[in-house]
């Protein structure tokens, strides 16, 4: 039996997580206007293949393709009735690939809706939505819940509360997306790093951090700012740069070598989990893995 | 003009109720709907947009300002639409796929209705297929698309492609507008016309329907 993820984090190991899924799905035939999570049911094998590639690249934490699999979000595609099976098949897809060679992380992204007064969602509706998704993820056997890419701190707290109410033993990671401003990093909703760290850790998150929205150089600064505020293990999942439009194609410019070189600085900052977000591929994860392994 | 300044100030602060009451006051005092729109509402929206770009304010402020904008637009809409009974032609409008910005597009709709055109508004996040499908169904001769994001404007090209494939180019004409697009962009992607604001959209439509 392998050690639990939290045990390994407590022994100050650096763990490598996986990279992007969405962009790979597009390159493997997912139509642009289709719900990426619908593939969990119709193309489970494709998701198993992607998980395998990340496992072979050296990732020890593999995410489920459930970023947009909360009922509030699935409703955009009239798939909210399928919440349970979409989440379960995503976990199964990863399980088929990794068996017990990696931890399965249940991804839980923003609802895509805004809480009142900015939008028209009541806090109860938001909570209910996360509760439904996370219930399915946990009962399908994920090792950890990853609430990610949040910009509204209240939405993040709602998801953490839902996860904690379902299980008192499953660890919860919570990450937010920050933008650089002349006054430091803020989420688009206006939350700065010290506030985010305090509120996320007060709510019981076991790992906190940031993903998306930045290339790795900014992520190093974000990691330093987070580390200055907390002792809780930190996760950083960087984009391979910012998306650029070239000849009608979206490209990300940071190479595996560049990101791996920079990941050393994340390790020096004592970041516990290093992985990728938009634009990263198994090649990026492999390069990061090799680089981090060479440090010890 | 104090009342006009007050409209934009209240809009910037996101006070929808005050924007509504100031707009009413301005109309009662005889200020034209166009002035209220351009020098009050749109002026305020531009200022909040600049502050958002410069990270002085965040999304919640912009959302509250947008709500306040609608509170004002609701009141001037009936005046801008005055006539609108005899239809001078049918136009399908919408914001392109992936894009949720609909304030500018709605203004374009209001002005076109005011000029006597029948406007079929598909809302925001509209797929290229949907634009063409509805134009065919309703017999509209113009498709008007709005895009506010550099990442979504490319989706407008798809509409041109579909029209070409179905041999409808020339029969159904296309207009685009929105901050990031331009005359140059319109011709690059094969759209018939670019329009810089809602008033201009009416002129362009007239021109295309003539
Ligand atoms: C068919 O024929 C025609 C003819 C003429 C046409 C036409 C069609 N369409 C428009 N026109 C023309 O006529 C109109 C009237 O004169 C004009 O329309 P406009 O729409 O230009 O003008 C309106 C009357 C007033 N202007 C507006 O309504 C836009 C104002 C600004 C502040 C703005 C707003 C309000 C919002 N936003 Co957003 N927003 C900004 C805007 C900054 C700015 N100053 O433009 C802009 C457009 N936003 C931006 C961004 C980045 C974003 N926004 C986002 C969200 C939002 C809100 C939801 C909060 C809100 C929209 C609310 C709503 N219901 O529309 C996000 C995207 C959401 C999405 N998927 O669409 C988000 C990505 C933010 C984020 N990081 O989450 C920037 C775009 C950068 C770029 N070039 O790509 C932005 C320029 C702000 C900035 N300075 O950074 C003309 O362009």
Image (cartoon, coloured by chain):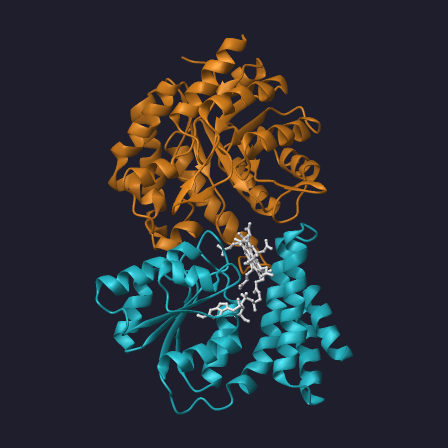
Which hue is chain A drawn in? orange
User: In which image quadrant can residue B160 be found?
Assistant: bottom left
Which residue is at the far top?
A296
Residue occupying the point 40% across, 20% down = A102
Asked whether residue A196 is in view, the answer is yes
| Quadrant placement of the N terminus of chain A | top left
Q: Nearer the viewer, residue B119 or A137?
A: B119
Which residue is at the far right?
B2
Seen in the picture, residue B181 relative to A258 is either above or below; the reply is below
Asked whether residue A117 is in view, the answer is no
Q: Nearer the viewer, residue B178 or A198?
A: B178
Residue B202, position as x, y percentages in the image? 47, 79
Looking at the image, residue A133 sits to the left or right of residue A226; the answer is: left
Looking at the image, residue B128 sits to the left or right of residue A20; the answer is: left
Residue occupying the point 68% across, 41% down = A192
Q: Nearer the viewer, residue B154 or A109?
A: B154
Ligand 1 quadrant in view = bottom right
Seen in the picture, residue A174 relative to B167 is either above or below; the reply is above
| Quadrant placement of the C terminus of chain A | top right
Residue A155, position as x, y percentages in the image? 56, 46
Residue B73, position as x, y percentages in the image? 58, 76
Which residue is at the far left?
B166
Residue occupying the point 63% across, 25% down = A232
Q: Which chain is cyan?
A: B
């Amino acid at each position: 039996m392998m050690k639990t993820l939290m045990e390994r984090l407590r022994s100050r190991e650096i763990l490598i997580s996986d990279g992007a899924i969405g962009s790979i799905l597009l390159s493997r035939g997912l139509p642009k206007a289709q719900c990426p999570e619908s593939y969990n049911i119709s193309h489970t094998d494709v998701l198993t293949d992607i998980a395998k590639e990340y496992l072979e690249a050296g990732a020890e934490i593999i995410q489920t393709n459930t970023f947009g699999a909360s009922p509030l979000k699935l409703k955009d595609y009239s798939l909210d009735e399928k919440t349970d099976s979409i989440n379960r098949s995503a976990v199964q897809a990863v399980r088929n690939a990794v068996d017990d060679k990696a931890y399965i992380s249940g991804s839980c992204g923003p609802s895509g809706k805004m809480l009142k007064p900015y939008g028209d969602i009541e806090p109860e509706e938001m909570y209910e939505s996360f509760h439904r998704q996370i219930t399915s993820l946990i009962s399908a056997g994920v090792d950890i819940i990853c609430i990610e890419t949040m910009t509204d701190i209240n939405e993040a707290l709602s998801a953490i509360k839902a996860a904690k109410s379902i299980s008192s033993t499953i660890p919860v990671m919570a990450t937010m997306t920050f933008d650089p401003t002349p006054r430091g990093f803020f989420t688009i909703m206006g939350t700065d790093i010290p506030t985010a760290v305090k509120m996320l850790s007060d709510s019981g998150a076991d790992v906190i951090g940031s993903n998306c929205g930045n290339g790795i150089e900014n992520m190093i600064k974000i990691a330093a700012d987070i580390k200055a505020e907390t002792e809780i293990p930190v996760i950083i999942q960087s984009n391979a740069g910012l998306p650029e439009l070239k000849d009608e194609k979206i490209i990300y410019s940071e190479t595996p070598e560049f990101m791996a070189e920079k990941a050393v600085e994340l390790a020096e900052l004592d970041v516990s989990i290093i992985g990728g977000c938009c634009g990263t591929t198994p090649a990026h994860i492999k390069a990061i893995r090799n680089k981090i392994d060479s440090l010890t | 003009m104090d009342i006009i300044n007050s409209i934009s100030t209240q809009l910037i602060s996101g006070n929808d109720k005050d924007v509504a009451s100031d707009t009413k006051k301005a109309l009662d005092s005889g200020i034209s709907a166009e002035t209220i729109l351009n020098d009050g509402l749109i002026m305020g929206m531009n200022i909040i947009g600049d502050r958002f770009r410069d990270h002085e304010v965040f999304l919640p402020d912009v959302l509250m300002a947008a709500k306040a904008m609608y509170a004002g637009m609701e009141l001037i809409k009936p005046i801008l639409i005055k006539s609108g009974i005899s239809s001078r032609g049918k136009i399908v409008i919408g914001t392109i796929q992936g894009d949720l910005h609909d304030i500018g597009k709605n203004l374009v709709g209001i002005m076109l209705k005011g000029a006597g055109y029948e406007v079929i508004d598909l809302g925001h996040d509209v797929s290229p297929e949907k634009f063409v499908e509805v134009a065919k169904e309703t017999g509209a001769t113009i498709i008007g698309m709005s895009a506010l994001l550099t990442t979504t404007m490319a989706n407008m090209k798809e509409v041109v492609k579909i029209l070409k494939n179905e041999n409808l180019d020339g029969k159904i004409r296309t207009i685009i507008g929105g901050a990031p697009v331009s005359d140059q962009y319109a011709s690059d992607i094969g759209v018939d016309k670019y329009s810089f604001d809602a008033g201009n959209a009416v002129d362009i439509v007239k021109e295309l329907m003539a």
